[in-house]
Image (cartoon, rainbow, N blue to C red):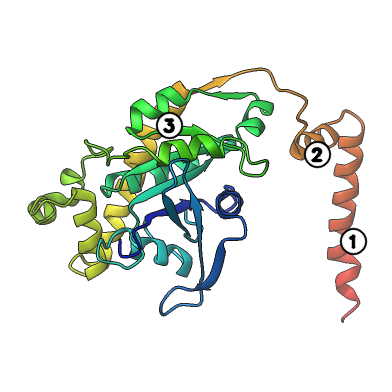
Amino acid sequence: MATGKIRVALVGNPNSGKTSLFNQLTGLNQKVGNFPGVTVDKKIGSCTLPDGRQLEILDLPGSYSIYAKSKDEQVVTDILTNPEDADYPDILVVIADASNLKRNLLLLSQVADLGLPVVLALNMMDLAERMGKKIDANILEQEFGVPVVAINARKGEGINDLKTILAQPVTARQRPFLDVTELAGPKYGKLINQGPEPQYLRLHQLLSSGEISAGEARSIQTRDTTLRYGKINKIVARAEKPTQRKGLKLYTDKIDAILTHRLWGYLIFIFIMFLIFQAIFSWASWPM
């Protein structure tokens, strides 16, 4: 760390509240540029810990998985799988939408296996509770081996708790969430176990270097994602406790109530069928 600051990167799925957390942490102490070689915004800011130390905060682009499918995700993958990268963080904060936990935890399981010190920030806990979901953070902490803190990035709640965690030593997960030796197969199993780097980091370095063919890479990605979701589903089933909804009426519920109504449902169905009939037999004849 040439600047003497602790470099912290924020990562999470799109619309998980990552940028809101970045703004809460940095306030006006931020600047916007571009990541090298791509037209993807690079936002860096700073904040002060309770003990006076400085954090350099990097807001990484939104990403669903380490297996990149877009420019934004490729930026995240390139940084987090290359310890020599100038933006490689000392600590990674994963922001997860607590109201959609399963989808968000895939990325957490992947980055934790890369050997990075990780903190999980559970955002939108209030929305999850209103939807009838109570999250047991202790179970997530035990299963993923990372500190967990509840926040509300929009309202600024839990930010001081997050800073307190970041002020303490944060260590990398000791055991991998998923042992990828079998996943890599006998052909690459030995390669990913060579050297001190975590297996998952070595696997992604082989993938990015092209040493693994495109067909084999797709097969590894599919099996990796499937196995991770299998474990994540079991964890979420334990960590997510159903409770009574608290006054939240989702727009889909409102639509369902109308479309399945004993009277209006039939009338809407007849009207839609009428429109389809008109489109086929009347409107389609106009251009002819």
Q: Amino acid at mark 3?
A: Asn
Q: Return the disc, 2 or 1, that comes first in the chain's sequence.
A: 2
For residue 93, the mark is: none
Marks 2 and 3, how far apart at CA: 28 Å
Give the number of the mark in front: 2 or 1. Answer: 2
Name the disc covering residue 255, or none. 2
Q: Residue at x 23, y 50 (%)?
A: 200
Label 2 sits on what residue type? Ile
SS state under label 2: helix
**Left or right of residue 68: residue 268:** right
- The numbered dot on residue 233 is 3
- The local secondary structure at tag 1 comes to helix
What amino acid does circle 1 point to? Answer: Gln
Q: Quadrant of residue 201?
A: bottom left
> Toward the viewer: 148 or 223?
148
Residue 280 falls in image quadrant: bottom right
Rendered image: mark on residue 278: 1
* Residue in the picture at 41% in, 49% down: 53
Percent x, y of residue 138: 42, 23
Residue at x 49%, y 42% (from the top left corner): 103
Closer to the camera, 146 or 65? 146
Label 1 environment density (alpha carbons within 10 Å; few <14, some 14–19, many ≥20): few
